[in-house]
Amino acid sequence: MARFCVSIAFILLVFTGLSQVTIQGELFSPTGTKANLEASIIISPLEKPGSITAFGFSSADGKFRIAVSSPSDSILLQVKSMSVRDTILRLANKSQLLRIPVTEQHHQISEVRVANRPIFSKGDTTTYIVSSFVQRKDFSIGDVISNMPGFEVSPEGKVSYQGRDIQKYYIEGLDLLEGQYSLANKNLPHTAVGAVEVLHNHQPVKAI
Amino acid sequence: MKQLPILIVFILISLSSIAQEYIKIDEVTHVFIYSYTFCEEHKNPQSAKKHEMILEVGQNHSKFYSSNKAFTDSLLMRYANESPEVAFSKIFPLVSGSPVPPFCNFYVYKNYPTANKTTFIASDLSSGKYQVEEDIKFDWTIDINATDTISGLICHKAQTSFYGRNYTAWFSLDIPINDGPYKFNGLPGLIVQIADTDNEHIFSLKGLVNGNNKPMYYVKNTNTNTSSKGYVNALEASKADLIKELEKGTFSDENMKIRAIKRVQNRNNFIEKHN
């Protein structure tokens, strides 16, 4: 007997689940002003307003047509667009023809800007973006290097990285000043430098 | 020396594109910045590359292209009245550090030049300029119960398939714009993230800025009309041309040449797949 009940319930569910209704309609602006009526039309179940059962789009003159198959008695219809105010209607779950008044309202999306990551590495090269480490008192590139994690700069301008003195100091890939690099370190303005790269397994002597 | 193949291609591009015409088609209301991660070689996660792409959305049209291309285009327009040699000498030093990977070298216009159609334009192939105009109707299946928060936006999940790959997209009703990266659209909100099931092609939203009604330009050219399949074939053909050029070239080191050719050969995983 118990099994019999279950099977009836199941059939009922399937029947209601299959019933498809068509919702047609038109958006219009009651003030008569010409608004851009292209919008997203979203149908959701009454008990879960955030989810989406069906969706469609209205054309430029505001007409739309959506097929909905939902088991519940009532459904929610949402009108969303960048140029009209969000409108929500509660409807009976049956085929119908609607005329929905909408008011013009321009939405603003808050801007999201992305900044570069201050430190990143690729292979055996670690790159430090100079502008991320500048403090107000800094003038030379050496001042900024001393702010970068892992670096230390002695008062004479010698640089060490993770406790070890650096081997070479290249400017644009060239060993311009050799041992005298502290000259550049103390006098090169940090505004002239984009990034500092650390080559971890550098081999300055070209073997073969 | 490693830069050589890229440089050669770049010189060809810049010279051919100096004398093109730009038409204003719309005003940009929003600019969405996507990061596009793609595997150049099929089934090789090591070959993954990343490139920044931008989606400009206007009142009626939208345009999706590489941000490096946007930079180059703005310079080409700035020097449009100079002689090609002068323009080239001014522009080249500025753009030589920002190449566009071959798989990102295109424009996608939605709703332009024909309403409700998507136009794909790739003008820098060795064999010519191509244009693919399509009426794409994506068949999206929305997963009612799946929601997630991506970049602070509440997103819904939808699935579709497109030219040989299956995609999962996350879109947000908070931005009710029926658009997305590449040729994707047809959802009630902006596509915030879309990836194929093998994670070989991933677009994800990284930033959004107001367009301040700056003009959206269409690059007018005489392009050869083709289909998606035709374009993929042309892409393969231009790859073969590049390999031929590399074989002719002189390299200081024979191994370097072999590696350069191999790298070009392994570029076999364009977003659209035809078997």
Image (cartoon, coloured by chain):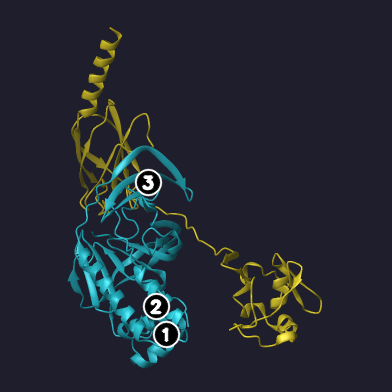
Chain colours: A yellow, B cyan
Residue type marked 2: Thr
Q: Residue at x 21, y 67 (%)?
A: B132
| Tags 3 and 2 both on a single chain | yes
Q: In the displayed structure, would residue B148 be above or below residue B242?
A: above
Residue at mark 2: B72
Say if mark 1 contacts mark 2, CB within 8 Å: yes
Say if mark 1 contacts mark 3, CB within 8 Å: no
Residue at mark 1: B91
**Which dot marks residue A61?**
none
Residue at mark 3: B173
Q: Residue at x 58, y 65 (%)?
A: A121
Tell me where residue A8 appears, x and y as whole percent: 24, 15
Q: Nearer the viewer, residue A66 or B10?
A: B10
Alpha-carbon span between mark 1 and mark 2: 8 Å
Tell me where residue B26 appears, x and y as whole percent: 29, 67
Task: Give the mark nearest the N terminus, 1 or 2.
Answer: 2
Q: Is residue A51 visible?
A: no
Q: Give the structural element (helix, strand or loop) at label 3.
A: loop
Within 10 Å of disc 1 (Cα), the crowding (few <14, some 14-19, many 20+) is some
Task: Give the mark nearest the N terminus, 1 or 3.
Answer: 1
With A71 as the anchor, is B207 left or right in this view? right
With B16 as the anchor, is B209 left or right in this view? right
